[in-house]
Image: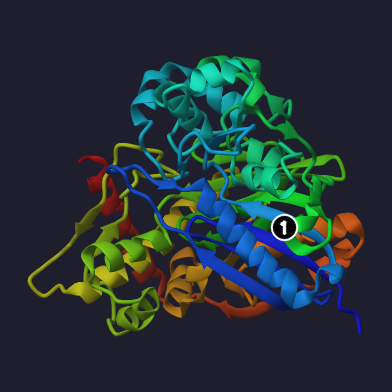
């Protein structure tokens, strides 16, 4: 019996998981650990890098024990992308907490650099926004005592979570990243595929702290023997949304994927062609077999996080999973809309100053209306992005492929199909970010060929539009009205 597996390390926003996939794509072992979210001030979001690493190691060791280290072909890594960590290469200690992609503390820095907006979009494909790494790096350098002096001595390294964890897993040998993650730093020229000197100068980021860049399917190093009892090749790295895209619809024209997690990320692969959009992110999909692919992406800041907010802050729901039954109990939204701009608005608006709003409340309204409105808001936000993609894409939108934790919510998926007016195809494995990372590693080693990997993706259910189109349009128009009110606040 073939016991060989490929592992994926999935470094998420609220926790880290490790999954082992057999040749048929089935999951034979998994482990997951959450870590705390740190909110020092309104709009600030941090993680403890030590906890990112410790939860990764714990999950990795558990999976290695379950499958046997001798049976592991290779390891792929996928990660939350823009989250920023600086650490001392001698002690291995971070100089400050990880500043998470959701963090908005650098809004004023972005306003000060507004005159460079067009240049930054041209070179990086990104919008000048606190979301990306560059202003976070600048903040740590400027605000944390002693960092500038330690950088001058060559003691400080920078990386997104893939780089931080990789450096530690390889016994501090590999300070590396790859283009899909580098392209989210706002320091990377997506046409030239290198860190750009002009961009480094704009943000005041020294070159000597940057990781090396290798193709996404490279051999990045070996897991140190002490962790699982054997050195294991780490043979692929991808940003989380690119990994999901790779698993869901790599190379298929007209295919779009949406991942419903803490945020929602809608992405379509544009191949070797870099298609410029005024409202969507242009980003690198991956560099595999030395060939670069590009993508259009709409990044939505508040997806499942809005339900978490209702649970943890308003305390009007006990478990996120309860939202489906509560929403289904209502026949419609009764005119209530929730615009979850709790961290500003991402795609396609890119307004850091926007703030959340709940509109249409009456004396009849209750918690069920707000909970349903939060779920509907996810679908509306995805439609905002899909409408922008239609303006740029050369291919008609024929289906939406979905994954992520919130994709298990049948109400949300049906409403998404109703509002988007396209079939919504849900993967059997909702953790497609992990599968994509495993795929990149396993194709590189020959564990899978491309056809074999494509066969690992299976569809759990297809949701087709059922709501009357006129009613769907009226609902969406109500959403647009609510968003416009939010933007005018």
Against 483, is 135 above or below?
A: above
Which of 344 and 224 lies nearest the eye of the viewer? 224
Position of 154 with respect to 33 (left or right) is right
Percent of width and height locating residue 149: 52, 16
Q: Quadrant of residue 368?
A: bottom left
The reply to whether residue 365 is visible in this rendering is yes
Which of 279 and 456 lies nearest the eye of the viewer? 456
Position of 335 with respect to 433 (left or right) is left
| Quadrant in the picture for the N terminus | bottom right
| Quadrant in the picture for the C terminus | top left
For label 1, the crowd category at 10 Å Cα-Cα, with few meaning under 14, some 14 to 19 and many 20 or more, is many
Percent of width and height locating residue 60: 67, 64
Which of 220 and 187 lies nearest the eye of the viewer? 220
Return the residue found at the far left.
363
Which colouring convention does the figure follow? rainbow
Under tag 1, what secondary structure? helix
Percent of width and height locating residue 50: 53, 49
Q: Residue at x 63, y 80 (%)?
A: 460
Against 225, is 191 above or below?
A: above
Task: Give the labeled residue for mark 1.
Answer: 437
Count of numbered badges drawn on the protein? 1
Against 470, is 277 above or below?
A: above
Q: Residue at x 55, y 61 (%)?
A: 259
Percent of width and height locating residue 464: 54, 77
Q: Residue at x 90, y 63 (%)?
A: 449
């Amino acid at each position: 019996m073939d016991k060989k597996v490929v592992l994926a390390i999935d470094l998420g926003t609220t926790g880290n998981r490790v999954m082992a996939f057999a040749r048929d794509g089935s999951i034979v072992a998994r482990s997951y650990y959450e870590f705390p979210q740190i909110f020092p001030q309104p709009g600030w979001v941090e993680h403890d890098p030590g906890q990112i690493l410790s939860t990764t190691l714990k999950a990795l060791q558990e999976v290695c024990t379950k499958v046997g280290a001798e049976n592991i072909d290779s390891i792929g890594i996928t990660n939350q992308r823009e989250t920023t960590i600086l650490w001392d290469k001698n002690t291995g200690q971070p100089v400050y907490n990880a500043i998470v992609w959701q963090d908005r503390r650098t809004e004023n820095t972005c306003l000060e650099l507004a005159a460079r907006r067009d240049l930054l979009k041209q070179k990086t494909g990104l919008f000048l926004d606190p979301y990306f790494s560059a202003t976070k790096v600048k903040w740590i350098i400027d605000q944390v005592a002693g960092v500038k002096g330690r950088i001058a001595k060559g003691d400080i390294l920078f990386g997104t979570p893939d780089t931080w964890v990789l450096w530690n897993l390889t016994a501090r040998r590999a300070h590396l990243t790859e283009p899909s993650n580098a392209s989210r730093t706002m320091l990377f020229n997506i046409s030239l595929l290198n860190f750009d000197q002009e961009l480094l100068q704009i943000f005041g980021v020294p070159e000597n702290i940057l990781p090396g860049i290798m193709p996404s399917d490279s051999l990045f190093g070996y897991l140190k023997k002490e962790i699982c009892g054997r050195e294991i090749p780490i043979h692929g790295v991808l940003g989380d949304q690119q990994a999901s895209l790779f698993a869901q619809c790599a190379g298929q024209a007209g295919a779009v994927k949406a991942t419903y997690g803490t945020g929602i990320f809608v992405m379509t692969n544009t191949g070797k062609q870099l298609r410029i959009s005024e409202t969507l992110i242009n980003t690198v999909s991956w560099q595999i077999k030395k060939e670069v692919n590009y993508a259009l992406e709409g990044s939505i800041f508040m997806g499942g996080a809005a339900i978490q907010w209702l649970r943890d802050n308003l305390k009007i729901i006990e478990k996120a999973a309860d939202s489906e039954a509560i929403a289904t109990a209502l026949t419609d939204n009764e005119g209530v809309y929730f615009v979850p701009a709790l961290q500003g608005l991402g795609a396609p608006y890119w307004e850091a100053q926007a703030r959340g709003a709940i509109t249409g409340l009456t004396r009849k309204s209750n918690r069920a209306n707000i909970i349903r409105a939060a779920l509907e808001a996810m679908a509306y936000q995805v439609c905002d992005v899909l409408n922008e993609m239609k303006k740029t894409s050369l291919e008609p939108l024929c289906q939406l492929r979905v994954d992520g934790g919130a994709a298990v919510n049948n109400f949300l998926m049906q409403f998404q199909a109703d509002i988007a007016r396209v079939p919504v195809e849900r993967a059997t494995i909702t953790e497609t970010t992990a599968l994509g990372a495993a795929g990149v590693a396993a194709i590189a080693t020959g564990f899978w060929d491309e056809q074999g990997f494509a066969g690992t993706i299976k569809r759990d259910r297809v949701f087709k539009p059922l709501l009357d189109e006129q009613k769907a349009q009226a609902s969406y128009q109500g959403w647009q009205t609510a968003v416009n009110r939010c933007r005018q606040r």
